[in-house]
């Protein structure tokens, strides 16, 4: 279990307990948190679950796969700490993780 | 007249219905929301039913759109195993099968579609099934495994995914297609050939251009598919994947215009201003292609859910999106964007033999659709180019050495 803070583009925070094994994307979507669309439900096929990972957590959330990198390459407002949240698996190590949402997923 | 406080009633608790309920709350809709579904479970994602779920890579919890307790938290009155049988537009009520009458201020029809079935001798044998619902998928999963043989009727994406999943579970698979090639309705010939070869190399057999006469059975269970040429294809189970039929009867009986789906405008509104229709059941305008179209994808359902939720909460109409879809078969990720309406040329980028390529459908120098095999950059850039309608340089697009970033920028 990990407590994850999702921050909407307008600054609104949502703190959610997310079960191990789920993705960071699922933690948001399954609780109807706005800001992550996740059209494909986690198949790494759409790049609509884009988040910014707080710098402090970059080491623990792993790195982008080649597929993810290619998808993000064409998303809007991409930063060095951009990730597709469907590709980050939740574990105890991510307890306290903070992710921010972009202005738009489309 | 509607009853004050009746709120929004959503008929159809699939991906579209669940999503619009959630969006209404995200957009601060404070009224009552009633979500009515015929299936016995809360809204879930259908795409994995023929892919990751069927192969056992994800569980039922992963399929669920939301955690079970979120409906109560979000004050959404979810009613499962509940069938709506009539709409009274003048009185603004929906009547349920058990006689209960539910008032609405706004009604959203997200009744989806049902799988088309065959009515041939033996169609009603046990083991002859469709693949649309979680219950269908559960039944199919039990039927697959080593020593079993699955016959797939219809070489569309659902059928091919089922065949690939069957192979992953150790079962044999044979795909029977009436037309001379698979994916004929949705994809170009090059892609049909590519997928046929890819499946064949992984042990799937094909019967192309094969008409079916019926099914043979023993003790009430299917044992084979009888072809028009007299041959019988032995099997333990059959999945019929030959398209879907929109569940438009409720709307049609209420006098709403239907043409292969419930006709709506770009805000997902039907001819009745208090009634919206979204997802597989809706026949909607697509400005980009200047025509009406009934989409059959999650992206289409989510886009229309957004349109309806915006209209109901007084938000501006959202920007039109480029429709897209995907398919997972073996280690292939196929991503499709746009629709090849009015396309006049095909352009292949990359070598199919490398298992990474994309087919672009062009009208003049404008990309109308793209089919990308393990080619995410081609898909993403293609989708952007379809939306922008920006002319491209064909020579650059055809050259994999020129990056898609450069193609899109030039």
Image: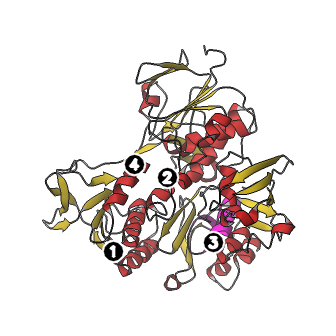
**Mark 3 vs mark 1: same chain?**
yes
**Mark 1 vs mark 2: same chain?**
yes
* Span colored in magenta: B363-388
Residue position for label 2: B46
Cα separation, mark 4 vs mark 3, equals 32 Å
Mark closest to the chain's N terminus, 4 or 1: 4
Which of the 4 image quarters holds residue B409? Answer: bottom right
Residue position for label 3: B376
Q: Could you say which is closer to the camera, residue B16 or residue A18?
A: A18
Assess whether mark 1 and mark 4 are in contact (beta carbons under 8 angstroms).
no
- How packed mark 4 is, by other alpha carbons closer than 10 Å (few <14, some 14-19, many 20 or more), is some
- Disc number lying in front (4 or 1): 4
**Mark 4 vs mark 3: same chain?**
yes
Mark closest to the chain's N terminus, 2 or 4: 2
- SS for dot 3: helix
* Residue B382 locus on image (x, y percent): 65, 67
**Mark 3 vs mark 2: same chain?**
yes
* Residue B323 locus on image (x, y percent): 60, 55
The residue positioned 80% from the left and 59% from the top of the image is A96
The residue positioned 81% from the left and 53% from the top of the image is A103
Cα separation, mark 4 vs mark 1, equals 25 Å
Q: Chain of mark 3?
A: B
Residue position for label 1: B204
Q: Which mark is residue B135?
A: 4
- Disc number lying in front (2 or 4): 4
Cα separation, mark 1 vs mark 2, equals 24 Å
Cα separation, mark 2 vs mark 4, equals 11 Å
């Amino acid at each position: 279990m990990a407590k994850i803070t999702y921050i909407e583009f307008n600054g609104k925070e949502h703190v959610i307990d997310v079960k191990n094994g789920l993705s960071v994307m699922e933690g948001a979507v399954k609780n109807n948190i706005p800001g992550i669309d996740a059209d494909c439900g986690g198949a790494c096929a759409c790049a609509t679950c884009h988040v910014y990972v707080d710098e402090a957590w970059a080491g623990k959330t792993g790195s982008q796969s080649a597929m993810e990198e290619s998808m993000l390459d064409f998303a809007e407002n991409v930063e060095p700490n951009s990730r597709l949240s469907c590709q980050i698996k939740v574990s105890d190590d991510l307890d306290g993780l903070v992710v921010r949402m972009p202005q738009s997923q489309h | 007249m509607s009853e004050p406080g009746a709120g929004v009633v959503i008929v159809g608790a699939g991906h579209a219905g669940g999503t619009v309920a959630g969006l209404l709350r995200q957009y601060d809709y404070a009224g009552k929301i009633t979500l009515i579904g015929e299936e016995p479970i809360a809204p879930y994602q259908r795409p994995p039913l023929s892919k990751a779920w069927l192969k056992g890579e994800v569980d039922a919890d992963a399929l669920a759109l939301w955690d079970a307790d979120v409906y109560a938290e979000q004050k959404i009155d979810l009613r499962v195993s509940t069938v709506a049988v009539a709409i009274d537009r003048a009185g603004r009520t929906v009547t349920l099968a058990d006689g209960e009458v539910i008032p609405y201020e706004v009604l959203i029809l997200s009744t989806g579609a049902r799988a088309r079935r065959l009515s041939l001798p033996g169609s009603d044998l046990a083991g002859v099934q469709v693949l649309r619902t979680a219950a269908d998928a559960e039944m199919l999963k039990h039927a697959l495994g080593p020593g079993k043989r699955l016959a797939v009727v219809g070489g569309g994406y659902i059928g091919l995914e089922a065949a690939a999943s069957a192979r992953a579970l150790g079962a044999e698979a044979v795909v029977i297609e009436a037309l001379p090639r698979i994916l004929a309705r949705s994809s170009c010939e090059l892609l049909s050939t590519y997928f046929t070869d890819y499946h064949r190399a992984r042990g799937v057999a094909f019967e192309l251009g094969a008409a079916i006469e019926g099914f043979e059975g023993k003790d009430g269970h299917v044992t084979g598919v009888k072809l028009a040429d007299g041959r019988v294809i032995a099997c333990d189970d059959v999945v019929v994947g030959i398209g879907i039929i929109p569940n438009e009867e409720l709307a049609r009986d209420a006098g709403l215009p239907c043409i292969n789906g419930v006709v709506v405008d770009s805000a997902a509104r039907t001819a009745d201003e208090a009634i919206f229709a979204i997802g597989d059941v809706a026949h909607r305008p697509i400005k980009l292609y200047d025509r009406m179209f009934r989409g059959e994808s999650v992206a289409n359902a989510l886009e229309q859910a957004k349109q309806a939720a915006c209209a109901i909460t007084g938000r501006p109409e959202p920007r039109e999106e480029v429709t897209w879809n995907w398919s997972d078969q073996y280690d292939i990720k196929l991503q499709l964007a746009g629709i090849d309406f009015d396309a006049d040329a095909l352009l292949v980028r990359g070598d199919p033999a490398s298992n990474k390529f994309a087919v672009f459908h062009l009208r003049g120098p404008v990309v109308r659709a793209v089919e990308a095999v393990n080619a995410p950059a081609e898909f993403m850039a293609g989708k952007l180019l379809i939306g922008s309608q920006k002319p491209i340089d064909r020579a650059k697009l055809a050259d994999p050495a020129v990056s898609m970033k450069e193609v899109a920028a030039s």
